[in-house]
Amino acid sequence: MIQLNITSLTEAAAQTHYPPGWITKSIEIKPSGKAPKKYGPSTYRFGASMTLSVILPRRGWTLVKKTKNYVYLIPPAGELKPPFYISIAVPPEDLCLKIAKECYAQGESWLGQLGEWPAQYLHERNTDMVKFSRDPLTGEMVSELLKNPPKSSLHIGEWGAWNADVTGIAGDFAIGIFPPGFIRSEELSPSPLSEGTPREVLLTSFERNEEARRLCIEYYGAKCQACGLVYEDKYGVIGKGLIHVHHVIPLADIGAAYQVDPIKDLIPLCASCHHVAHHRNPPYTVSELRAAIAASL
């Protein structure tokens, strides 16, 4: 059994020490663009402002400015252009699951830090939702409360740097997100370098509610609301009904009580537009995606 002491882990993190079982990885830190010219030609803008404003200065970066959503940083001499990589310890997937199960056994929500990463555990969060539909006789919108089992979740890290999400019901947990593209496949010393080992990577988080997804697609249709792609038109019958459903407010930012509106809170996007939307934190809006597409034509 893993004994968690958030205070002691936070103190260890300040000394760049890591909990047992963590492994060192090389992680690509992707800038969202150059900073305004007034901050200098070598200053980059990043998301994950809470995390990167701390861990990058420890690695020779210069902190220029921090805002709510962005942080402006200058890379070390000799590394003035992307791609940027840092060496940092992260918990492997099996350890994330163990931590989540131990937190569930303790039965308390907490907010703190593990290693160099911000972390949060929410215990049995209410996931009841409201179903909206139109009365066929009166034409008025009516609502119905849909009861769902409470969910527990463990979030380690921050989107835009590295993050792991573990969600579960009644103590049965599964890894939800290990964002691909951030972590390079090779492990650093002391692990030997190797290639070719099969490894499963989960690319999407688990849906919060299938009924909400269905109602969203029923309202908008299985059509990307940014670029207009209909998979069936492009791929024929094998693409029928395929579409991603994008959360306008990221799930990681939703509070302890959340009732989803499938029309206002969800919107269909194709895989490409969904990926671009989450290239920034907060995500790009559908209007911004449409403007970007129009400008590129």
Image: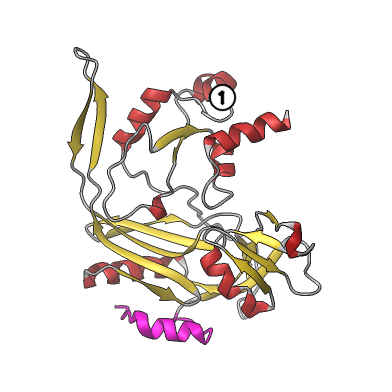
Q: Does the magenta stretch include residue 297?
A: no
Residue 209: image x %, image y %? Answer: 31, 40
Of all residues shown, which one is farthest toward the front?
38
Q: As rendered, which of 84 and 65 lies closer to the eye?
A: 65
User: What colouring does the structure picture have?
Assistant: secondary structure
Tell me the SS state at disc 1. Answer: loop
Of all residues shown, which one is farthest toward the top?
137
The image quadrant that residue 99 belongs to is bottom left
Say if 293 sits above or below 190 in the image. above
Q: As rendered, which of 37 and 267 lies closer to the eye?
A: 37
Name the amino acid type tagged 1. Answer: Gly
Residue at image location 34% in from the left, 30% down from the top = 214
Number of callouts in the render?
1
Residue at image location 63% in from the left, 73% down from the top = 56
Q: As rendered, which of 66 and 253 lies closer to the eye?
A: 66
Say if 2 sits above or below 260 in the image. below
Residue at image location 59% in from the left, 49% down from the top = 279
Residue 291: image x %, image y %? Answer: 63, 33
Q: Does the magenta stretch include residue 5?
A: yes
Residue 128 lies left or right of residue 241; in this view the side is: left
What residue did someone put label 1 on?
228
Residue 278: image x %, image y %? Answer: 54, 47
Residue 105 lies left or right of residue 254; in this view the side is: left
Q: What stretch is highlighted in magenta?
A: 1-20
Residue 121: image x %, image y %? Answer: 33, 66
> Where, quadrant-wise, is the C terminus in this rendering?
top right
Classify mark 1: residues with Cα within 10 Å, few (<14), some (14-19) or many (20+): few
Say if 6 sits above or below 225 in the image. below
Residue 170 lies left or right of residue 166; in this view the side is: left
Residue at image location 29% in from the left, 78% down from the top = 1
Residue 187 lies left or right of residue 91; in this view the side is: right
